[in-house]
Image: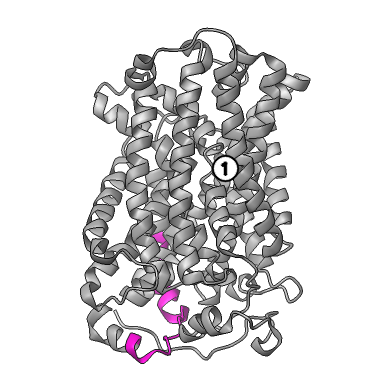
Amino acid sequence: MHLLPSPPLRHPRGSIPLSRRRTAALPDDDAVLIAEGITPALARKMGGFGNYAVSFSVICVLAGGMTLFGFGLHNGGPAVMVWGWVGIFAMTLVLGACLGEVTSVYPTSGALYHMAHRLGGPGWAWLTGWLNLLGLVGAIAGIDYGAASFIGAFASLQWGFEPTPENTMAIFVCVLFLHGLLNSFGVGLVDVLSKISVWWQAGGVTLIVGTLFLAPGERQSPAFVFTEYYNDSGISNPLYGAGVGCLMAAYTFCGYDASAHMAEETTRAQKAAPWGMVHAILWSGVAGFVLIVGMLFAMESYAGTLDTATGVPPAQIFIDVLGIGMAKALLVVVIVAQLFCGNAETAAASRMAYAFSRNRALPGWETWSRVNARTENPTAAVWLCVGIALVLALPSLYSPTAYAAVTAINVLGITPAYAIPVFLRLRAGDKFQQGPWNLGRFSKPMGYVAVTYVVVLTVFFCLPQAYPMTTQSFNYAPLTLVVVLLFAWISWITTGRKHYAMPLPSSTAEDAVIAGGMV
């Protein structure tokens, strides 16, 4: 593959010329973008903690861990939920560190596909971009639909609301609209809400686990929490069943690339973005372990929790242990955390869609690459992502397994996209020049571990998740993935290679590396 000619630098429609923007960060951050051939257009208002807060908010153990708690109980039970979490956490930390090293060199809103282009060429970038976009908007759909389910459970307890698929979808549309609206005001509001989210999640996990621990009543034994295996999916092989159960952890540990996508709006981004990414994974892993173990110790009835009338197993645990009043209060804590999560994910997805459009990759790119001159925010891209998320979630009206398919789409789309820049960095060998944040001599061995993990995870989650297979239990995620890959390939050979344009970096050293065989 060969790089396309560099398009002339231009200000995206509606952007503010460099001479009129705040230039305090220019010697470091904006200069890095200019060296990459990118005209800075977004407001750089986010610090290191804010960047970390976005990824921590997106991972959100009170969203993924709680939303898929029932899925874990069905597929592997406590043993898989606990040890699967530990294993996926460890592998994700390795993968995130490897991705952070590449992010340090290329701190742009395009993130993964931009890295893939610089290290592998436009074909790799096109594939990575579509996988990343699929994963990000799939995450919005999964997070917000999960929040809608919890809101429905709360309304059921409070007002006798019936959480039918139609009612849940109506709540979901309202949540999507809220996140589109909040993300239209600019990165300043996203920064504030994400910082609040960090403390809300930390306090929420502490409150939930502490309240369940202090409540009177019997507790499950350590043997139950750490060794009990349960599977009613029809999968007879325990290893296969345990692997399916790991989807709970794998789905939760997605979205930490948000730190990379927000890099153009972060100060000292070459260090802050990878730092934010890795620390978000680390502290989410610790908080999630505490939350899962605490919930399992408190669970009174396995069958009753699975068959809860609320449709949300964690809500049944709260009711059994604490009563309806306190259960509703804890549900509000979880719901608010999920709303923070969806808001941060919408921000990350919109930056990726904006950057991809900036390079003429999306149909209608002229619209989606616009930056609001007042807020310095990619508002059009925000609503594009909200609209795609709505389309992805619509099958949930007709199939009870559609939500699991959406979460698997998130994993299958975004996880391979994480591994491609790491693989291309390994392929580049010593030609890859490490940035300010790097893994030193551990870079290559950790990279091989990360890529192997992603290959295994991707193949595994393409397998059926329940037997016997019916139209209701069929795993639609790999089919969706194939359709997206086919679309990406056809669109590349028909229009993509003609219109997609990434400016060449101005650094002569970078040009020399690319010309030396990395494309």
- 34 displayed left or right of 461: right
Q: Is residue 7 left or right of residue 354?
A: left
* x and y percentages locating residue 437 in the rendered image: 39, 68
Residue 255, given in percent of the width and then of the height, sits at 48, 52
Mark 1 neighbour density, 10 Å: few (under 14) some (14–19) many (20 or more): many
Left or right, residue 188 beside residue 321: right
Q: Residue at x 44, y 62 (%)?
A: 274
What quarter of the picture does the N terminus occupy? bottom left
* Front residue (pair 504, 99): 99
Q: Residue at x 65, y 69 (%)?
A: 45
Residue 159 falls left or right of residue 292: right
Query: Which color mode does the image show?
Result: one colour
Residue in the image at 47% along x and 18% along y = 297
Q: Main secondary structure of the magenta part?
A: helix
Q: Closer to the camera, 279 or 224?
A: 279
Quadrant holding the C terminus: bottom left
Q: Quadrant of residue 147?
A: top right
Image height of 43 relative to 386, above or below: below
Q: Residue at 78% across / 21% down in the picture?
A: 159
Q: Does residue 324 sit above or below 416 in this rendering? A: above
Q: Which residues are magenta?
A: 486-510
Identify residue for label 1.
143
Secondary structure, mark 1, is helix
Name the foreground residue: 300 vs 454.
300
Q: Amino acid at mark 1?
A: Ile
User: In terms of image quadrants, where is residue 231?
Assistant: top left
User: Magenta stretch containing residue 104, yes or no?
Assistant: no
